[in-house]
Image (cartoon, helix red, strand yellow):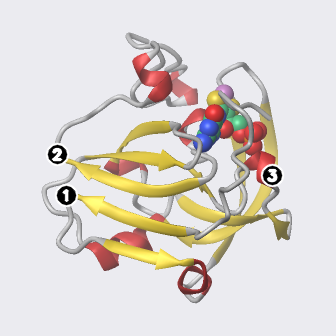
Amino acid sequence: MLAVGPTPPDAAVDWSFAVRGAVERERTWSWDELLALPRETVTVDIHCVTQWTKLDTTWTGVSIDTLLVHAGPRDARFAVAHAADGYDTNLPLDDLTGGRAWLVWEYEGEPLEPPHGGPARLLVPHLYFWKSAKWVRALELLADDRPGYWEVNGYHDRGDPWLQQRYQGD
Ligand SMILES: Nc1nc2c(c(=O)[nH]1)N[C@H]1C(S)=C(S)[C@@H](COP(=O)(O)O)O[C@H]1N2
Ligand SMILES: [Mo]
């Protein structure tokens, strides 16, 4: 467990998830609307930048591809994930598409626990785990890259564990 601050107590209150910014149509889903979307269960390895790796973790959620179909990206190449604790993190849009990223609400078959991002978090297992924003509430699509919380503080814009992209310049 790692977060820059305490678990936000109101992360599940009036929950909604928005895709906004460089899109054809801004879209917002309520909790019930989220649960009505086609869901996937995936088993993946996750990698923290401070060295740990967790093998074969199982998550259930909706792929970001599915959400983006509804919003229709428009000249977007990057995204910033915004979370209820004020945390944000930027990603190339290519890393959120192609069946490699999800908005998840179950971990190992149980509702995602609040300290780990419940009710719902981003899951981008092929990048370092700081990109997987907990308590995520919006994806903002952008034409140009804009660094998030850790990226402003020197962490890498993309964060590929296989390329050991920990810090800017790696
Ligand atoms: N909203 C939010 N998401 C976040 C963070 C955070 O501080 N706030 N920390 C990130 C970091 S640095 C890591 S390693 C993982 C930790 O996830 P875990 O607590 O489920 O292990 O969450 C990431 N997502
Ligand atoms: Mo981290």
How far, Cα to Cα, is label 3 from label 1? 34 Å
Of the image marks 3 and 1, the number of the one nearer the N terminus = 1
Q: Quadrant of the N terminus?
A: top right
Q: Is disc 2 placed on a helix, strand or loop?
A: loop
Determine which quarter of the picture holds residue 104: bottom right
- Residue 56, labelled with which disc? 3
**Is 140 left, or right, of 98 in this rendering?**
left
**Disc 3 or disc 2, which is closer to the eye?**
2
Q: Earlier in the sequence, mark 3 or mark 2?
A: 3
Q: Nearer the viewer, residue 55 or 108?
A: 108
Residue 116: mark in rendering: none
Residue type of the residue flagged with mark 2? Ala
Q: Residues within 10 Å of mark 1 (few under 14, many from 20)?
A: many
Q: Do the residues bearing badges 1 and 2 touch, measured as CB atoms within 8 Å?
A: yes
Q: Residue at x 32, y 76 (%)?
A: 69
Quadrant the C terminus occupies? top left
Query: Quick check: 49 above or below 63?
Result: above
What label does residue 143 carry, if any? 2
Residue type pointed to by label 3: Asp
Decide: is 142 above or below 159. below
Report x, y in % for residue 3.
69, 32
Estimate the spatial distance between the alpha carbons at disc 1 and disc 2, rounded to whole Å: 7 Å
Residue type beneath disc 1: Ala
